[in-house]
Image (cartoon, rainbow, N blue to C red):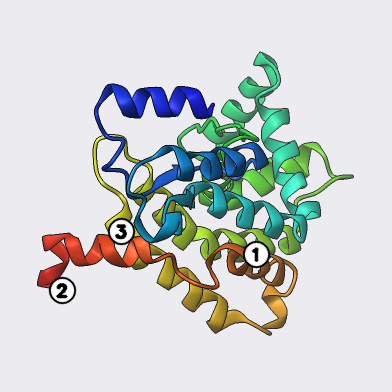
Amino acid sequence: MHNIIINSICEYNLKSKILSVTFDNATAMTSVANMLKTSLESVLLDGKLLHMRCACHVLKLCVKDGLEGLKQYHEQFKHVVLHLNSCKWRRQEWRNYCKSEGVKYRKFPLENNTRWNSMYIMLSACIEYKEHLTGFWNSVYPDNPLLDTHWNNMEMYVDFLCAFMDATKSFSHVYKTTSPYFLANIIPIAQLFDKYRGVESHSGFLPKMEKKFLKYWTDIPYIYVFAIILDPRWKFD
């Protein structure tokens, strides 16, 4: 991996122009970053700014840890969506119910385990159809009902994750610089932790999420501060 990266850097004549590189959180990538510090020329501050961890990946790890505290409720919704999408006649059953209730039929998106925001999208779609989904499911499967407890916890969790979703969208660009947007998205999340820390309703997920958040961002990397200073758009704010 180191050889592939350094060869690409040399191909574009960037060996003396690299300030930082974003990696995911795999252990192997930490080794690659350490090797690059000696392979590159004129590394600023002895390479202290070179290794940046992917912000989207860190956000995903935070959400994943928090979801463990609400797994019993999340699994219920995942089970409902998988069930409704499992075969044609079950989809038709849900379609007929929507028609009888006078609402537009909605096919709920499935969760993708490799993309946490797919879970957010799935749960948001369920909340949008809360009344009708509850009525349908509880009439067909009264032994495994959707309860107010399930809804209350999921609505609270989805509302909390809105800032994480906004940050992920802001960071997920290919043809646009994203580092200047880091502080504007991360500070609201830190403020959320501060606001709800110790609140009983959030105790099931917030402590684990904040612990993971602080593992990587107790100190904000200087590279993001430099990015804001160097971006003229921020001088208007």
Measuring 59% from the left and 65% from the top, which residue is drawn there? Answer: 213
Earlier residue among tags 1 and 2 = 1
Residue 156 in picture, x, y percent from top left:
60, 66
Q: Of helix, strand and loop, which one carries label 3?
A: helix
**Residue annotated with mark 3:** 181
In front: label 1 or label 3: 3
Kindly state the secondary structure of the residue where label 1 is placed.
helix
Judging by the rendered image, the residue that carries numbered circle 1 is: 209
For residue 146, side relative to residue 61 (left or right): right
Instruction: Describe residue 156's horizontal placement relative to residue 174 as left or right.
Output: right
At x 59%, y 27%, the residue is 96
Task: For marks 1 and 3, give the CA distance.
Answer: 21 Å
N-terminal-most mark, 1 or 3: 3
- Image location of residue 175, percent across then percent down: 24, 35
Viewer-closest of 150 and 37: 37
Residue 117 appearing in the image? no
Q: State the quadrant of the C terminus.
A: bottom left
Residue 25 location (% of width, % of height): 60, 45
**Mark 3 or mark 2, earlier in chain:** 3
Q: Say whether marks 3 and 2 touch (CB < 8 Å).
A: no
Q: Which amino acid does label 1 sit on?
A: Met
Please report contact status of discs 1 and 2: CB closer than 8 Å, yes or no: no
Provide residue 217's location: percent of width, then percent of height. 53, 67
Which residue was labeled with disc 2?
237
